[in-house]
Amino acid sequence: MFFKIAIIGLPNAGKSTLFNRLIGRKSAIVSSIAGVTRDRREGIGRISDLSFKLVDTGGWDEKITFSQQVMEQLELAIDEANLTFFLIDASLSEQNKELAKWLKKRTKKPIILIANKCESKKSCDANYLQHFDFLGPVYISAEHNLGMADLYEVLSPIISQFYKENKLENSSSTNIRIAIVGRPNVGKSTFLNSILGSNRVITDEKSGTTRDPIDTIYNHNGHSITLIDTAGIRKKTQIIDDLEAISVKNSLDIIRRSHIVILLLDSVFGIEHQDFHIGAQALNEDRGLIIVLNKWDLINSNDRKELLKFIKQYELSLSAPIITTSALKNVRCTEVIDKCLKLYTFFDQRISTAMLNRWFEAAIQKHSPPLAKGRSVKLKYITQISIRPPAFVIMCNTPENLEESYKRYLLNSLRETFYMEGIPIKLIFKKSKNPYSSIKK
């Protein structure tokens, strides 16, 4: 259980910049264009020894696109939070006053007034909002990391009291990171909403609705999971502007930071080469992979057979389980998460050297390595060197002479014995040292 803080403010007040600063990485897109952030975005924020769940929100503005949905997300963020950061650009006084009135009516929980873009306090003045009785004001520059010590002083006693009352430790726990990826409009946000049982992210028939990666911390049967909805990944030649280019780059970065990747495909519109390219990205980054065929209820039995037959022609399908779903009707969506957890268990698994070598000896007895230039390749032993992904080293006398087909045989046998489809496994062959090579003649 975390202390939860929502960041609220007008468009371009610097909410995403502060969010990125406090979580320690560039998760949210920062742009001078108003209305870039639309959904709630969650991350674990830290200031010194304080840790808390931080929620970035869309700008409070009734005129921007998706304004009603943005406002709904903003209201939910405030309702679920223990405290609100009211972030202002001090120069926008009249709009800030309107938002201040709205905030005071919306919540009775603590609100800290934070004036951003204050590289110099002389250039900022938030005193015109003092009569609203907010905590602060605290003057900061999120971009230049100024004023965080002042923010700490206001925030520290509130968070400390929360953890004390709830008998909790002020620390973050590791959890499983699952990325939901795919082309635009395949149903990624609808899938996430179905899992969570609420309209957590904005959905629309128009492609490109999701721009930022949206992190949501979720508890599934006692397992802490971070589900990440990403922007649709199109071919480079189809990207329409710089903002979409940033969104696509962020989506690819999310794949690298995840443990498991859910590749969502559109059963109605069919499969494209780009789908397999996205899946290959996940496997190349050594992530666990699940292929999910969404909108399965909208195609007939013949089309289903043809689609599965088509997918199984690709090597990607040999490395990942396939699950059919309907995100809109919430059919088998939680089964996908169950499968992700199962994959993660194997992803995190360490096998004893004794068990590995019993399998190793049996595999060699069943199918010995072919001769190379009339000489036998001697395979000596195997040991596991890492997890996430599992990696193994096999010691042998002449690894350069071992045929690729035999390496694939050992890899497939290892997977069938200890792992499951969807788990990337690394098998490294090393030359064992000659014990007599160091003896002087």
Image (cartoon, helix red, strand yellow):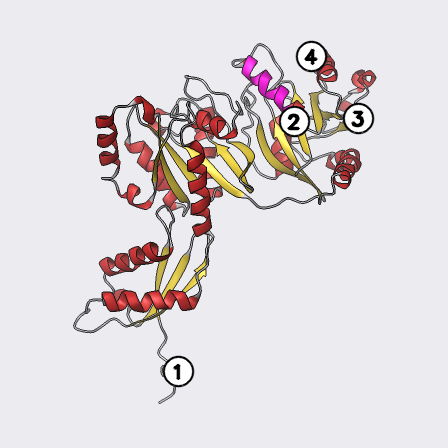
Q: Up-down: is 249 above or below 98?
A: below
Q: CA distance from mark 1 to mark 2?
A: 68 Å
Q: Amino acid at mark 2?
A: Glu
Q: CA distance from mark 2 to mark 4?
A: 24 Å
Among the 4 quarters of the image, the one containing residue 273? top left
Q: How many marks?
A: 4
Q: Is residue 12 visible?
A: no
The mark closer to the camera, 1 or 4, is 4
- Residue labelled with disc 4: 95
Query: Percent position (x, y) of residue 231?
Result: 45, 28
Which stretch is magenta?
A: 68-77
Which secondary structure type mostly characterizes the magenta part of the structure? helix
Q: Nearer the viewer, residue 66 or 196?
A: 196
- In the rendered structure, the answer to whether residue 371 lies left or right of residue 226 reads left
Disc on the earlier residue, 3 or 2: 2
Among the 4 quarters of the image, the one containing residue 89? top right
Disc on the earlier residue, 1 or 2: 2
